[in-house]
Amino acid sequence: MIINLYSKTNCPLCDKAKQVLQELQKEFSFQINEIDIYQDDVLLEKYQLMIPVVEIDGEEVAFGIVQKDVIKKRLLEVGNS
């Protein structure tokens, strides 16, 4: 499974979100695909006020302050489907 993390450089919330995802990798098998929204005008327009955004299976499951419990719950749901 691949989890997309939409972020940008010099973003403390993005760094925290990445740390949360890395902690969850100890319990779940997935890859983190970090995407800089400033490399794509469409993504910049869509996410500039929301980052970081965590996307699992094409669904935006968290943005802004990313909470580990929210991501973990979604990973459990995806794993059981």
Image (cartoon, rainbow, N blue to C red):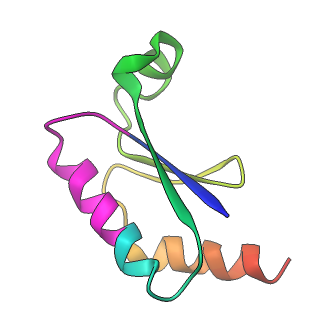
* Residue visible at 28% across and 67% down in the picture: 19
39 lies left or right of 73: left
Please identify the residue farthest to the right as the structure is shown. 81
In the image, residue 41 sits, relative to residue 10, either above or below, namely: above
Q: Nearer the viewer, residue 34 or 45?
A: 34
Magenta stretch contains residue 9: yes
Residue 31 in the image, given as x and y percentages of width and height = 54, 62
* Residue visible at 45% across and 15% down in the picture: 45
Residue 18 figure quarter: bottom left
* Residue visible at 58% across and 69% down in the picture: 30
Residue 5 in the image, given as x and y percentages of width and height = 45, 48
In the image, residue 24 sits, relative to residue 60, either above or below, namely: below
In the image, residue 5 sits, relative to residue 39, either above or below, namely: below
Please identify the residue farthest to the bottom as the structure is shown. 27
Residue 37 figure quarter: top left
Magenta stretch contains residue 17: yes
* Magenta part of the chain: 7-20
* Residue visible at 33% across and 49% down in the picture: 64
68 lies left or right of 55: left
In the image, residue 42 sits, relative to residue 58, either above or below, namely: above
Which quarter shows the N terminus? bottom right
Residue 47 in the image, given as x and y percentages of width and height = 44, 29
Main SS class of the magenta portion in the image: helix
Residue 42 in the image, given as x and y percentages of width and height = 53, 14
Which quarter shows the C terminus? bottom right
Image label count: 0
